[in-house]
Amino acid sequence: MADSAKADTTQLLRAWSAGDSRAFEQLTPRVYRELRRIAAQMLQKERPGYTLQSAELVHEAYLRLINVQEMEWQDRAHFFAMSATLMRRILLDRARKRSATKRGRNPIAVDLDKALDVYAARARELVALDEALQTLEEVDPRRARIVELRFFGGLSVEETAAVVKVSSETVMRDWKLARAWLLSELSGHSEASVRNP
């Protein structure tokens, strides 16, 4: 996106924050395609045949964004970061519901049983990742935020740097360290789940 278009989007976000409903109407077509891209990227990490479509995820996130009161948008990267966070929470809520539903079911068919096991495993993976990310946030909030923006939000290094207010080099360093920490943490989760199914 050209710098002038980014600046226009930022101006519309700030006008919307100030209560200008026309700014919101003008903003919607500008950000919709990018929100769909972020949603599609997040849904790629879900199991095949996942019922939620990217448009539905965007609409659900958009409904939550509309209800955000008194948000002072810094720029478009801040908006997309918040959108990505909301989408992550929506997917996590659904994963927790799937996990809870799985515990209460008694599947009849063998094929259905296998499908539900895969479905539940993906839900557990997402919940485990969220738990690891929460632990990382307690230890190092900036690195957790960078993971959230890059992994879930699909933001570039430069966009992430703008949101977090650090250099691109710092984002890359924190990104590598956070990924290594999360891989180590998630290895512990998978070992624990094998020992305690």
Image (spheres, rainbow, N blue to C red):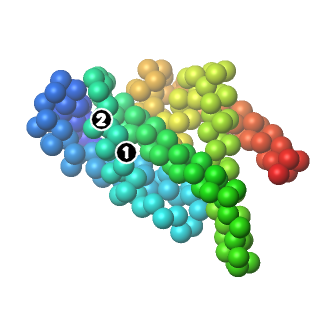
88 relative to 32 in the view: left or right: right
Q: Residues within 10 Å of mark 1 (few under 14, many from 20)?
A: many
In this view, 186 is above or below 72: below
What residue sits 49% from the left and 28% below the top? 168
Outermost left residue: 22
Q: x%, y% of residue 88?
A: 49, 43
Amino acid type at circle 2 is Asn
Ranked by sequence position, the earlier of labels 1 and 2 is: 1
Q: x%, y% of residue 93?
A: 53, 46
User: Under tag 1, what secondary structure?
Assistant: helix
Q: Splitting the image into 4 quarters, where does residue 92 fall?
A: top right
Q: Mark 1 highlights which residue? A: 61
Q: Mark 2 highlights which residue? A: 67
Outermost right residue: 195
Closest to the observer, 15 or 193: 193
154 relative to 116 in the view: left or right: left
150 relative to 103 in the view: left or right: left
Q: Residues within 10 Å of mark 2 (few under 14, many from 20)?
A: few
